[in-house]
Each structure stands twice: as C-alpha cells, then as structure tokens.
Amino acid sequence: MAMIEEQLPDRIFENPGVTLRPISEGAEKWLYRPIQCLDHGFVYLVDYTGTDLSVVDAARVSYGQGTKSVNTAEGLIRYLRRHVHTSPSEMVEVKFHCKMPIVVARQWVRHRTANINEYSGRYSEMLDEFYLPALDDIKAQAKDNKQGRGDELPLDIRQEVRTRFAEGYRRQYEDYKWFLDVGVAKEIARLGLPVANYTQWYWKIDLHNLMHFLRLRLDSHAQYEIRVYGEAMARIIKDAFPLSFGAFEDYQLHAISFSRLELDVLNANQWPMSRIKADRVVSAGIANKREQAEFIAKLQKLNFVL
C-alpha cells in the first residue's frame, strides 16, 4: 500500500474532505450558468472531470512522478501542446448542455470525437423556436468563397428576407401542429420543419478534441452561427483550464504554420517587400491560387508585405 501511495499526487492527501477528485475553481463558477447564443440558444457547463494538473499527472505517469508545483505544471503543459503530445489532454473531459438551430447542429456533429444525446423529435414535440438572423447577418453570397457570406445587401432586401423567414416558420409550425392534431406520427410530422428549428443536446468531449473543435470553429472563416457557440465554450474553458487554454492560444489558435513551399519562398527572398513584388515571388514559388492567397495573408500578419 505504501508503494502505491508514493505514486499518488500529494494534493489528494492535503484536503481529505468531501471529494478526492481534482476541482477546478474556474470550472465550478461556470456550472449550470447558461451563456446565451443567437436568439434562442445557449451553452452551459454540466460537468467536468479533471483539471490542468490532471493533464500533467497523465503525462508524468510514464515515469511515476506526480505533479510537484504549478510552475512546473505550466511548463510541462506548454511543452506538450508545443510538441503536439495530445493524449494527456484526452484524460480531461467536459460535458455541455447546448441548444442550437438544427443547421448549426449538423455542422457541429461533423466533429465525431464527442458523445452526444440529442432532443428526440420522435418522442417529443419539436419546439416552436426558430433562428431568425439579425439584419446585419443577412448578406450576399461571397464571390470568392462558395460557402461564405460576402457584401452587404440593401436594407429593404434584408428586411424582406427576415419577414419571409418569419412567415415561413409560422406556416410550417402551424402545419406541424395540424399534422399532430389529426394523428400523424411525430416522426413524420416533423419532416416539414426547417433546419432553423432549434434542437438541443448533451455534448461530452475530451479537452484535446475540444481544442481542435475550437481551433476550427473560432476561425474567422467559420460560419458566424457556429462561431458564436465556439466563443461561448472558449470563455468557459479559458477559466476552467487556464494553463491548457493559454498554451492552446499560443501554439495553435493564434499561431502561424508554414508549408515546405512557403518556407522555400521565405528563405529565397528578402523581406519585407511591396504587395506587388510579394504577389510575384509567391506566384513563382506556389502554383495554387488559393494557397497563394493564404500565404499572402500569413505574410501580412507578420508585416512582411508593405
């Protein structure tokens, strides 16, 4: 027994009170505190297992030493994140209750590393709640991006779009209720409802895969409607696991990586340079036009393009 105890983290002997599980004060303050998202949605933290120190303990089990101090914990967490050693972060899990439009849920569920239990439209009536975009969020199709928004639309067009959305939602939900009233099964009656209808689920995921989700969904190119949920979860995770989230921000979220072709262009030229010259040297070294544009954007962040 003594040999086993020697391998346990010192902190579990310091406060033998209500629980021996590691507690994150930052996570505790977010439990069951909803953050509103869009017009009818929300995100809140239901539960969590582990803390930043749990990541460290998992990493150090390979040589049998528990966490010694927060300072060394931060250094190790940053090392793990910097060198993409991800399995220790997978030992920490979080569980959210989320309510979102079905169109957002369909994007969200593409992240297949989570456990999900969703509201059942076969068992329960679908909610009379639909996402109605704000006027500022109704824009034209982007000219250079087949899946994004672009320029502003005239105000009268945007107002008419909202009016037609609202009227359509009302008619579709009235039809849905009529189907139910005449005895149509819920699983069939719901077929006429739009993807703007709200659903909700419990969503459980480990910390590493949550950060991967956030890296994609916090990006400026992500659809606004799902980015709102990413921002809400990021607020919670930043408080719950500050050391891990800080390393994630520094080495992934706000970092820049370069391909071999990009490094070749960087090493072969003197920087900074004008935009005209940069376009010329980049196109000479990289054939794909989208890659060229992405590389120019990186160079602009570094102030390498004047």
Image (cartoon, rainbow, N blue to C red):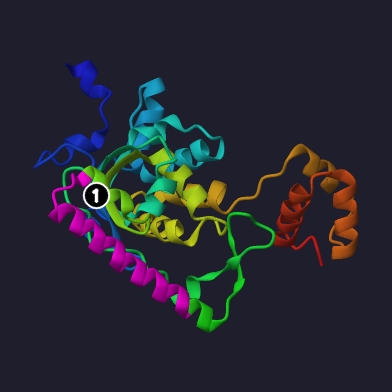
- In this view, the residue farthest toward the left is 18
Residue plotted at (33% across, 30% down): 66
Q: Position of residue 186 (x, y in %)?
A: 20, 46
Whether residue 190 sits left or right of residue 304 in the image: it is left
Q: Nearer the viewer, residue 67 or 205?
A: 205
- In this view, the residue farthest toward the front is 182
Magenta-colored span: 159-186
Residue plotted at (43% across, 56% down): 226
Relative vertical location of residue 298 with respect to residue 174 in this rendering, above or below: above
Report the quarter where the C terminus lies. bottom right
Q: Is residue 97 visible?
A: no
Number of other residues with Cα within 10 Å of mark 1, as a class: few under 14, some 14 to 19, many 20 or more: many
Q: In the rendered structure, which amino acid carries the disc numbered 1?
A: Ala
Q: Position of residue 180 (x, y in %)?
A: 16, 53
Residue plotted at (21% across, 23% down): 5
Q: Which residue is mark 1?
A: 189
Q: Position of residue 275 (x, y in %)?
A: 84, 64
Q: Is residue 7 magenta?
A: no
The quadrant holding residue 276 is bottom right
Q: Nearer the viewer, residue 128 or 216?
A: 128
Q: Is residue 179 magenta?
A: yes
